Amino acid sequence: MLGALSIGIGGMVGGGIFAVLGEAVSIAHGATEIAFLVAGIVALLSAYSYAKLSVAFQSSGGTIVFIDEAFHHSLFSGTMNVILWLSYLITISLYAVAFGSYAQTFFTGEHIPYLKHILISFAIVFPGAINLVNASLVSKSETIVVIIKLSLMALVIVLGIPYIDVQRLSPANFEAPLSIVAAGMIIFVAYEGFELIANAANDIKDPKKNLPRAFYGSVIFVILLYILIAIITVGGVDEATLLDAKDYALAVAAKPALGQFGFTLVAIAALLATFSAINATIFGNARLSFVLALEGELPLIDKTTSINPLWGVLTTIIFSLVLANTIDLSAIAIIGSASFLLIFTVTNFSAYRLHETICANKYITLFATLVSLLSLITLLLHTYKTDIHAIVVFIVFILCSVLFELSYGKIYRKRLLTHK
């Protein structure tokens, strides 16, 4: 169970919190901790569906298998699986941009043309090279990085408590309820990593007992962690200072207690966390592309089930580079959260359709579906008013997934299955 729990916590406390904390403050202000709680509740409801589905369908395919079981190999399921693959590309891009933001703080006063783009590209290319050369380094290093991240966050929380100004957290500094919910949905991408537990279901002992514990335990732990971080950040630092340093807000939150040393320490932790998260996501997404290719939903270029699918890694690197260097951090966070809210809506509905098979409460799965859907709608309505460009990109992603599945999935998949 501890292994599954660490996968869930590591998947959530990756680069997400470092990337989206400042964005949450800019929207929710004094209610940032409530925004993280709202997003966490949505994640916890989805964790119920994932726990039930993972016990019933133990497979490294995870979400792909759940959607296929509910909707079979159809245009809809194929499209959703391609959207899942694209969602991980967005996640990699989010981590890379966050890496670039924190890394740039070490070059204060130096003028280097296109510095941030250089750092962003390095954050994608170098982990990609590691995946190509020695993929085993990914899993070996992940536990160490998770321990470092959690230890430094705990240090910032404990030492930052005396510096909290409760007036900054008072309801007088709250935004309207709808804005708080919208902020929670924008930062939802910081919670999406719990679904990675499903991909490890085959390797967990006594899955009927330990899988639900891992899902619920990891999500609840991370909700509490994020709320504490939000309280320390908003309560300990003047909001104007946080907004000036929005892209690296967590490092600024360490300054009241630890000064410049704390800022540097958290910045280094952010580099480790985002780099590790990119490393692991490239590792997972390359293999996801291989699974989708075997199902006929992506081109089958890698001909073996090797631990290191060359073209899967290269494709992931190329697409991530384009996305990370052309879309800003705020838009990437919105698109990533919207994509995973869509995926979780469909997964929750899959659990509802299969509730008898997976022994789930149909009312809970239906409620989880409605909450995820309403969360997605809230996010899109808020974004429509503030960043129409992000909406356009999200719609383009969906259309590309549908068109790709219509062309490749409907035609070439049949040929692939015929020649098996």
Image (cartoon, rainbow, N blue to C red):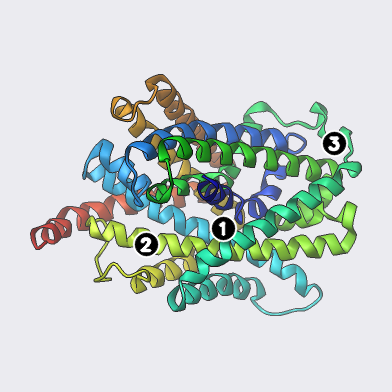
Camera sees residue 130: yes
Residue for badge 3: 168
**Residue found at x 63% / y 57%:** 146
Image quadrant for the C terminus? bottom left
Of badges 2 and 1, the one in the foreground is 2
Classify residue 327 as left or right of residue 395. Answer: right
* x then y, percent, for residue 207: 41, 40
Q: Where 35 falls versus 420 (above or below)?
A: above
Q: Earlier in the sequence, mark 3 or mark 2?
A: 3
**Distance in Å between CA atoms under marks 3 and 2:** 45 Å
Residue type at numbered disc 2: Arg
Residue type at numbered disc 1: Leu
**Distance in Å between CA atoms under marks 2 and 1:** 20 Å
Q: Where 216 falls versus 295 (above or below)?
A: above
Q: Residue at the front extreme?
A: 206
Q: Earlier in the sequence, mark 3 or mark 1?
A: 1
- Mark number for residue 287? 2
Classify residue 132 as left or right of residue 143. Answer: left
For residue 342, what is the image quadrant?
top left
Residue type at numbered disc 3: Arg
**Residue found at x 61% / y 51%:** 13
**Distance in Å between CA atoms under marks 3 and 1:** 28 Å
Q: Earlier in the sequence, mark 2 or mark 1?
A: 1
**Residue found at x 65% / y 71%:** 116
* x then y, percent, for residue 213: 52, 36
- Badge 2 density bin: few <14, some 14–19, many ≥20, Cα 10 Å: many
Closer to us: 152 or 405: 152
- Mark number for residue 94? 1
Tell me the SS state at disc 1.
Answer: helix
For residue 108, what is the image quadrant?
bottom right
Tell me the SS state at disc 2.
Answer: helix
Q: Where 391 falls versus 381 (above or below)?
A: below
